[in-house]
Amino acid sequence: MSKESFCKAEERRLHYLLNFKLPNYYKKIGLAIILISFLFLIAFKFIEGEPEWVRSILQKAMLVGLLVITISREKIEDELVQSLRSKAFSIAFILGVLYVLIQPLVNYGVGILIEPNDTNFEDLGDFQVLWFLLVVYLTAFWSLKRKNS
Amino acid sequence: MKNTLKVERAILNLTQDELAQKMGVSRQTINSIETNRYVPSTLLALKLSKIFGKQVNEFFSLEEGD
């Protein structure tokens, strides 16, 4: 493969990756995944001796649902939508970093107020961070879309 | 940047929806451009130019501070 065609293939792959979107009806599938896993999470709260791996799988299913909605096309996916997506991603990224930095301190502070002798400083888990990022992205995207309608 | 998209659209007697369909974008995009909330790409500007039969700078112009 020549250097030029290699570069073109790389460019094509990158372009495909950047523009990859699921069809619009996947939004409903994503929502269904979230609702089902949420209901199961609630239901398992009332079952005694719930195994930890079930909770972990349901949490991951919720993340998959949110991701599916995030990468699903709008009915008309034009350049305004692309621009709103970029804005929503930057908002989610900045708030995500602030959340990761500030939330553990808030948790620690509240922990000290409630139980001064038994409080440890803990970082956020991956589920919490990813869930926050995806929810902030979707909220920002929907509110920007509503502003522009 | 300001524009006279609404005027040009009225001259051609097009609704926002009809113009959006001609350009392959959503009605919201046309509305956002008309209300100066969104600056379109060169591609969209050229499509508008083709539909209106005018140069881009006849319906888009810079404002002070741009």
Image (spheres, rainbow, N blue to C red):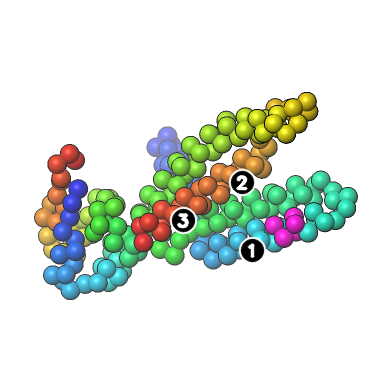
Residue type of the residue flagged with mark 2: Trp
Q: How crowded is mark 2: few (under 14 residues within 10 Å), some or many (20 or more)?
A: some
Is residue B3 in view? yes
The quadrant of the rendering that contains the C terminus of chain A is bottom left
Magenta segment boundaries in residue numbering:
A38-42
Say left or right for A37 vs A130: right
Q: Mark 3 lies on which chain?
A: A
Magenta-span inclusion, residue B31? no
Distance Cα–Cα, label 3 vs label 1: 18 Å
Distance Cα–Cα, label 2 vs label 1: 16 Å
Q: Which chain carries label 2?
A: A
Front one among A49 and A32:
A49
- Please check whether the numbered discs 2 and 1 fall on a single chain: yes
Q: Mark 2 points at which residue?
A: A131
> Depth-wise, is mark 3 or mark 1 nearer the camera?
3
Q: Mark 1 points at which residue?
A: A32
Q: Residues within 10 Å of mark 1 (few under 14, many from 20)?
A: some
Q: Mark 3 points at which residue?
A: A142
Q: Residues within 10 Å of mark 3 (few under 14, many from 20)?
A: some
